[in-house]
């Protein structure tokens, strides 16, 4: 079969590889009808999320048809149309039963303390061969796969494999309540679903921060107030828009960002911009600005965490769903502690959240379709990755068709 295979940092190829087979009684083999490219894939290809093993098939989003099931998959059979959630969970351990399916004790072959098991990731996550392929072996299929109703097409379903649940999880972690003002940093696909989910939970206002005009347009179309951080200092603007108070909840849907990793002209331009922003912020909230000043690229918390902690009101909640590598050690803890912030974070508990979202889409309460902007055959996968990586205008979410 054809599959997108990781060969090394910056080196992915469309290869012909052996078809997968059942290995465990709880496995299913799924013929994939739709896959997708995610921002997390880019982190793995760039090496900002380390530990990828050469030969691993990429991708952690898929919709497909069950081709074959193991002896202990008793709820599915050949021909069933299913959604494959990105993370794998057993359904019987204490964590799964409590809804923390991303912390399943059973799914990760590296042991219960190894963390989240997901498709197409680094060694520490399994590794499990991913879903940008024509077929996939899905582990713990009985407890992980979700059967799809006929009225949800692949274009909508593929958005529920990872990014819609992750955005929803971000709003859940942020403890969004009726009437809250919520800031979402990052207007990529997950950020778009964080905006949508905050609204579904009753947020009164949502402010969305990014630098890509087409992404900001999409957030505005959802009813968000948008801030372009290349034009305006996001913290200054959010304080101004909230009477100097800040937002009740903030969601980081960016994660480890390119700005901090950048060296040379991009980093020094960013430093110049930070200095200018520091001066602007002093006009509206000098006390708040004091503690987090003097940030330099390459040494401290990511830009988005700095902004998130400054933009949230006293006693507000910071929710982190953007991806950080396991060895990242920086958070502006002093500012957060001194302002009584709650900080909640983690990998999405897909299997606990997604059935509810499938129901919302099936009954017409919410239509996720506007976030899907590109459909490409898997044979164009490498070019699609390049266009997505370059953030070409309008490229928000790319579906791959095997
Ligand atoms: Zn489990």
Image (spheres, helix red, strand yellow):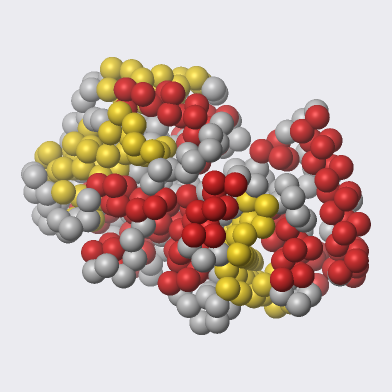
Residue, x 60% and y 45% (percent of image)? 212
Residue 130, percent from left and from top: 35, 35
Q: Horizontal placement of 67 versus 389: left or right? A: left
Q: Nearer the viewer, residue 102 or 173?
A: 173
- In this orientation, does residue 291 appear? no
Residue 353, percent from left and from top: 36, 64
- Residue 376 in which image quadrant: top left
Q: Residue placed farthest to the left in the image?
A: 78
Q: Horizontal placement of 138 versus 121: left or right? A: left
* Image height of 195 relative to 187, above or below: below
* Image height of 103 relative to 343, above or below: above
Residue, x 57% and y 68% (percent of image)? 206
Q: Nearer the viewer, residue 274 or 213?
A: 213
Quarter containing the N terminus: top left
Residue 237, percent from left and from top: 75, 63
Residue, x 71% and y 71% (percent of image)? 241
- Residue 256 in which image quadrant: top right
Residue 283, percent from left and from top: 90, 66
Total marks shown come to 0
* Image height of 110 relative to 344, above or below: above
- In this orientation, does residue 214 appear? yes
- Residue 336 in which image quadrant: bottom right
Q: Horizontal placement of 76 versus 267: left or right? A: left
Q: Residue placed farthest to the bottom in the image?
A: 178
* Image height of 10 relative to 203, above or below: above
Residue, x 46% and y 29% (percent of image)? 385
Quarter containing the C terminus: top left
């Amino acid at each position: 079969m054809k599959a997108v295979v990781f060969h090394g940092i910056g080196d992915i190829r469309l290869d012909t590889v052996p078809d997968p087979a059942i290995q465990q009684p709880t496995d299913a083999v799924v013929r994939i009808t739709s896959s997708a490219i995610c921002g997390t894939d880019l982190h793995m290809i760039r090496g900002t999320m380390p530990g990828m093993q050469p030969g691993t098939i990429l991708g952690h989003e898929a919709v497909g048809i069950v081709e074959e099931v193991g002896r202990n998959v008793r709820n599915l059979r050949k021909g069933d149309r299913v959604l494959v959630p990105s993370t794998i969970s057993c359904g019987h351990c204490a964590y799964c039963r409590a809804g923390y399916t991303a912390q399943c004790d059973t799914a990760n072959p590296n042991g219960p303390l190894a963390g989240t098991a997901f498709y197409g990731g680094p060694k520490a996550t399994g590794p499990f061969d991913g879903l940008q392929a024509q077929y996939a072996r899905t582990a713990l299929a009985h407890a992980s796969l979700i059967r799809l109703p006929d009225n949800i097409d692949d274009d909508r379903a593929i958005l529920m494999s990872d990014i819609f649940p992750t955005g929803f999880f971000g709003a859940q972690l942020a403890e969004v309540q009726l009437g809250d003002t919520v800031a979402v940093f990052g207007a990529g696909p997950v950020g778009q679903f964080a905006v949508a989910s905050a609204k579904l939970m009753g947020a009164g206002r949502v402010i969305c921060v990014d630098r890509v005009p087409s992404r900001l347009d999409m957030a505005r179309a959802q009813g968000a107030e948008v801030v372009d951080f290349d034009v305006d200092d996001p913290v200054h603007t959010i304080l101004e828009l909230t009477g100097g108070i800040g937002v009740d909840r903030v969601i980081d849907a960016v994660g480890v960002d390119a700005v901090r990793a950048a060296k040379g002209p991009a980093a020094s331009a960013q430093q110049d911009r930070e200095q200018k922003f520091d001066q602007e912020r002093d006009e509206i909230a000098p006390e708040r600005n004091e503690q987090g000043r003097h940030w330099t690229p390459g040494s401290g918390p990511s830009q988005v965490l700095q902004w998130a902690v400054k933009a949230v009101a006293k006693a507000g909640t910071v929710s982190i769903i953007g991806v950080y590598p396991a060895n990242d050690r920086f958070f502006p803890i002093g500012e957060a502690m001194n302002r009584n912030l709650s900080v909640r974070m983690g990998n999405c508990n897909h299997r606990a959240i997604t059935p509810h979202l499938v129901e919302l889409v099936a009954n017409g309460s919410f239509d996720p379709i506007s976030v899907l902007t590109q459909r490409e055959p898997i044979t164009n996968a490498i070019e699609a990755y390049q266009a997505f990586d370059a953030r070409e205008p309008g490229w928000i979410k790319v579906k791959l068709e095997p």
